[in-house]
């Protein structure tokens, strides 16, 4: 292939190639590996744009129904030109191609100064006299992996993805590509495909929309993160000597998506974030998470800089908050270092029917709050706390009056989509926009509420009735949801927003970029909380990861520290039996709070390294786990160590020679000998965190 351009993007190198068929391929590698590139020797070529137009042929190779990659549309693409925009803060590369119908495609790659990510997306513009219908248009496509040898060696390339289900978010799955049958056959006639994703309105369901590929010999990892709020797909493809990756919006096969585009009209995909670096997926993944700091900086919420502590009363009342319960909470919390007091689900609820079925009317329950919210708000402020409140704005419950407003709800086959006891608003509907503005935004303004927890507790599925395909209707509705997030923040710029979706079902870029914190999981009291919290270090910023610490009256001191230590892996969210705790139990919690505040700068800015064998069962975990969090200059670090069951000793390597400054938790023995930390536990389900300081070697 002929190299047509080369760009340096920080510590990454981007090369564009024209292949013998006239198509364009691109490659990103670490800059320090630029001289080591040896492209795979192949006969079948690829494209940086993956598209399929209705009416063009589907690809051969036994893949129809599984993939439209390298369709006739792609085979007809011809290179037009490439333009480069260079500014002080960014580089943007636009590569234009056209198909046999005369349609134009522009592939964009944008790098922002000092960042570790390349943003990429594709724009389609119809130039045909007839209406064009897209069946596939990916946000990104990479080929020539791995580019450090003419032939990929067996067992060298490993693919990592992160599985997810309710209360078990982020379980890592790492396998050699051969285990997925991603190796070429004796001749390149039948492609190997591993396609995965999710369909509907919960982007983190089944899997996170992320993928990593590691060349173990070269110690290089490529990573991709899709910016999709709904249905998405990722594809690993192997026909010839190179592995190819692509993905974006779920296509017609996977998500029943087509998009009709008239002459002169255009369609632009959502972005994908790409990165490449030296190291494995646990290291390179943090190049993607760190990119979210740009969004947090734009939000400009100074209160968040100290990673303040949240108290959420949900696990205290289980959906039955009242004036009496809140006043009792405030008494128990008085003088403690809590910044946000969050009234969770149920403040609007019928006392008998419960919180879930009443969602949607958003009227304060006068039985639970006989004096309205005003007196409660006043008391919360008097205690020096910021009031937070819970909404599930996109849905409506069966017992709500608004449940009957079916004209404004999503339908399939003319019937409102009902999942259990929920229906879904059409967020594009002007009536819905006005209704939610009045019920939620005006409510927040009028009551001076400073913290909003936005929840979302079911999935509307593949899509619904409308003028376009069900997949396109789904995409448009979720774009309207994101626009309403933006409207909330525009009208209430100082509002702190928490992103929640039955825990972690929306831990995806579009929602992370529109919130200050995100609920890491609905795992409230499970032994697997520290496992999930550690998983998050490869998926979201620790400073955005809100972790439950639910304390019960029956908890021993060892159990309290087991619970509290998990919050050191992110943000602390307290709840539980706070009215019934002993003085000694509160002292144990207060010590944990003080320790959290001591290590807060390291949580906010740093890098993480995890140790311990993968946990097979989250319900009955066996083994040990350690997460080392290094400060940016490595002068300080902390290690959060968990013992579940089984072997009770472990040694943790450290990057520097450290000495112990402080500890919080329980164990039988602990020591740090220069660059190694040793811990021995005396009981099952214990935890300890050690704050370390680099030894002064000048003495």
Image (cartoon, rainbow, N blue to C red):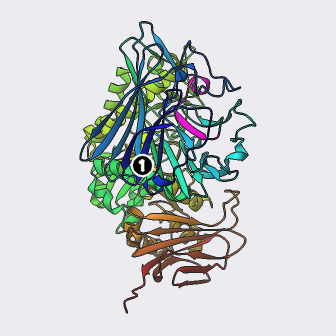
Q: In which quarter of the image is the C terminus?
A: bottom left
Question: Where is residue 627 shown, x and y percent of the image?
Answer: 54, 67
Question: Where is residue 31 shown, x and y percent of the image?
Answer: 43, 54
Residue 220: tell me if it is visible.
Answer: yes
Q: In this view, does 594 lie to the left or right of 165?
A: left
In the rendered image, residue 92 lying in the magenta stretch gets the answer no
The residue lying toward the viewer, choosing from 320 and 406, is 406
Q: Return the residue at label 1.
A: 13
Question: Where is residue 318 shown, x and y percent of the image?
Answer: 53, 50
In the rendered image, residue 251 lying in the magenta stretch gets the answer yes
Magenta highlight range: 241-256
What residue appears at the point 46 percent right and 84 percent down from the top-left corner? 659
Q: Is residue 253 left or right of residue 698?
A: right
Q: In which quarter of the image is residue 44?
A: top right
What residue appears at the point 35 percent right and 26 percent down from the top-left corner? 433
Question: Where is residue 570 shown, x and y percent of the image?
Answer: 46, 60
Q: Which residue lies furthest to the top in this view?
A: 129
The residue lying toward the viewer, choosing from 311 and 263, is 263
Q: Residue furthest right?
A: 186
The residue lying toward the viewer, choosing from 361 and 646, is 646
Say if 306 sits above or below 126 in the image: below
What residue appears at the point 65 percent right and 53 percent down from the top-left corner? 156
């Amino acid at each position: 292939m002929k190299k047509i351009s080369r760009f340096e993007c920080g510590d990454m190198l981007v090369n564009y190639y024209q292949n013998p068929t006239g198509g364009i391929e691109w490659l990103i590698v670490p800059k320090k590996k630029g001289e080591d590139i040896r492209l795979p020797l192949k006969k079948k070529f690829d494209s940086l744009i993956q598209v399929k137009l209705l009416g063009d042929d589907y690809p051969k190779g036994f893949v129809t129904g599984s993939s439209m990659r390298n369709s006739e549309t792609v085979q007809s693409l011809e290179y037009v030109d490439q333009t480069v925009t260079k500014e002080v803060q960014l580089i943007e590369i636009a590569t234009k191609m056209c198909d046999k119908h005369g349609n134009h495609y522009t592939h964009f790659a944008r790098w922002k100064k000092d960042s570790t990510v390349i943003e990429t997306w594709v724009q389609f513009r119809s130039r045909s006299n007839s209406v064009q219908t897209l069946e596939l248009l990916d946000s990104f496509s990479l080929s020539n992996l791995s580019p450090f040898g003419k032939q990929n060696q067996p067992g060298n390339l490993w693919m990592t993805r992160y599985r997810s289900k309710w209360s078990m978010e982020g379980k890592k799955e790492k396998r050699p590509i051969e285990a997925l049958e991603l190796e070429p056959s004796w001749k390149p006639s039948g492609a190997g495909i591993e396609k995965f994703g999710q369909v509907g309105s919960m982007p983190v369901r089944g899997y996170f929309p992320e993928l990593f590929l590691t060349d173990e010999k070269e110690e290089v990892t490529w990573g991709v993160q899709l910016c999709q709020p709904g249905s998405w797909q990722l594809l690993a493809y192997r026909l010839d000597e190179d592995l190819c990756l692509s993905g974006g919006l779920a296509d017609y096969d996977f998500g029943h998506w087509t998009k009709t585009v008239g002459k002169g009209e255009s369609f632009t995909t959502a972005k994908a974030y790409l990165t490449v670096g030296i190291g494995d997926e646990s290291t390179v993944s943090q190049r993607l998470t760190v990119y979210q700091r740009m969004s947090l900086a734009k939000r400009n919420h100074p209160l968040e800089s100290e990673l303040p502590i949240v108290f959420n009363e949900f696990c205290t009342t289980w959906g039955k908050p009242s004036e009496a319960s809140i006043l009792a909470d405030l008494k128990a919390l008085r003088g403690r270092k809590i910044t946000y007091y969050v009234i969770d689900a149920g403040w609007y609820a019928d006392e008998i029917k419960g919180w879930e079925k009443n969602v949607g009317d958003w009227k304060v329950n006068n039985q639970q709050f006989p004096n309205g919210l005003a007196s409660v708000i006043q008391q919360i402020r008097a205690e020096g706390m910021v009031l937070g409140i819970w909404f599930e704005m996109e849905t409506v419950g069966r017992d709500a009056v608004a449940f009957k407003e079916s004209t404004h709800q999503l339908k399939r086959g003319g019937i409102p989509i009902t999942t259990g006891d929920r229906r879904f608003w059409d967020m594009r509907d002007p009536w819905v926009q006005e209704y939610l503005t009045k019920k939620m935004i005006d409510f927040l303004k009028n009551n001076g509420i400073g913290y909003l927890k936005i929840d979302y507790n079911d999935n509307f599925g593949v899509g619904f009735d409308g003028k376009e395909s069900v997949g396109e209707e789904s995409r448009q509705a979720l774009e309207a949801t994101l626009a309403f997030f933006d409207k909330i923040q525009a009208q209430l710029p100082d509002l702190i927003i928490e992103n929640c979706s039955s825990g972690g079902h929306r831990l995806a870029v579009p929602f992370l970029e529109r919130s200050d914190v995100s609920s890491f999981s609905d795992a409230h009291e499970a032994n697997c909380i520290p496992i999930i919290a550690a998983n998050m270090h490869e998926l979201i910023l620790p400073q955005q990861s809100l972790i439950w610490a639910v304390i019960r009256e029956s908890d021993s001191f060892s159990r309290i520290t087991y619970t509290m230590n998990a919050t050191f892996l992110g943000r602390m969210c307290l709840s539980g039996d706070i009215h019934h705790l002993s003085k000694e139990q509160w002292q144990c919690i207060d010590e944990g709070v003080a320790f959290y505040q001591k290590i807060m700068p390291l949580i906010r800015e740093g890098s993480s390294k995890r140790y311990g064998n993968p946990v097979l069962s989250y319900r009955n975990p066996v083994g040990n786990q350690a997460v080392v969090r290094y400060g940016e200059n490595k002068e300080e670090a902390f290690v959060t160590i968990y013992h579940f069951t089984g072997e009770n000793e472990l040694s943790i390597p450290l990057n520097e020679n450290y000495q112990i400054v402080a500890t919080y938790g329980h164990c039988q023995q602990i020591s740090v000998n220069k660059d190694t930390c040793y811990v021995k536990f005396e009981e099952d389900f214990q935890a300890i965190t050690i704050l370390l300081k680099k030894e002064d070697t000048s003495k």
